[in-house]
Image: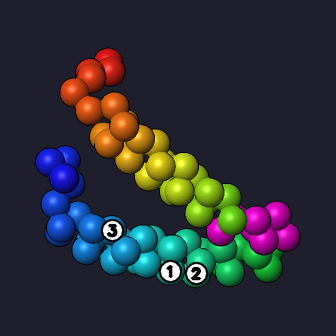
Amino acid sequence: MQHYSVLDFILLPIYLLVILMAANIYARKKREENPIYNYFMLGLIAKIVGGLGLAFVYTYLLPGRRYY
């Protein structure tokens, strides 16, 4: 685990919880005005999972390569 430390894995759920709580509050307020915000949380979670997945692929499966 040369790229990530234990602290990274401890802080990740905390950051995700804060971000998702703030996004849920925002979506709840906007949902009354526009029903399309029913899909806001699903889209945000999909984007976060995709970003984290891409980061893990680049750091674990492709070590030592540089991509500019």
Mark 3 lies on a secondary structure that is helix
**Residue indicated by mark 3:** 12
In the image, is 66 to the left or to the right of 37? left
**Residue indicated by mark 1:** 21
Q: Which residue does the image show at 26% across and 21% down from the upper left?
A: 66
38 or 47: nearer the viewer: 47
Q: Nearer the viewer, mark 2 or mark 1?
A: 1
Label 3 neighbour load within 10 Å: few <14, some 14-19, many 20+: few
**Residue indicated by mark 2:** 25
Q: Nearer the viewer, mark 3 or mark 1?
A: 3
Q: Nearer the viewer, mark 2 or mark 3?
A: 3
Q: Position of residue 50 (x, y in %)?
A: 54, 49
Residue ranking furthest to the top? 68
Q: Amino acid at mark 2?
A: Ile
Mark 1 lies on a secondary structure that is helix
Q: Which residue does the image show at 58% across and 81% down from the upper left?
A: 25
Q: What secondary structure is the stretch in magenta mostly built from?
A: helix
Q: Which residue does the image show at 38% across and 47% down from the upper left?
A: 56
Label 2 neighbour load within 10 Å: few <14, some 14-19, many 20+: few
- First in sequence: mark 2 vs mark 3: 3
34 or 44: nearer the viewer: 44
Discs 3, 1 touching: Cβ within 8 Å? no
| Distance Cα–Cα, label 2 vs label 3 | 20 Å
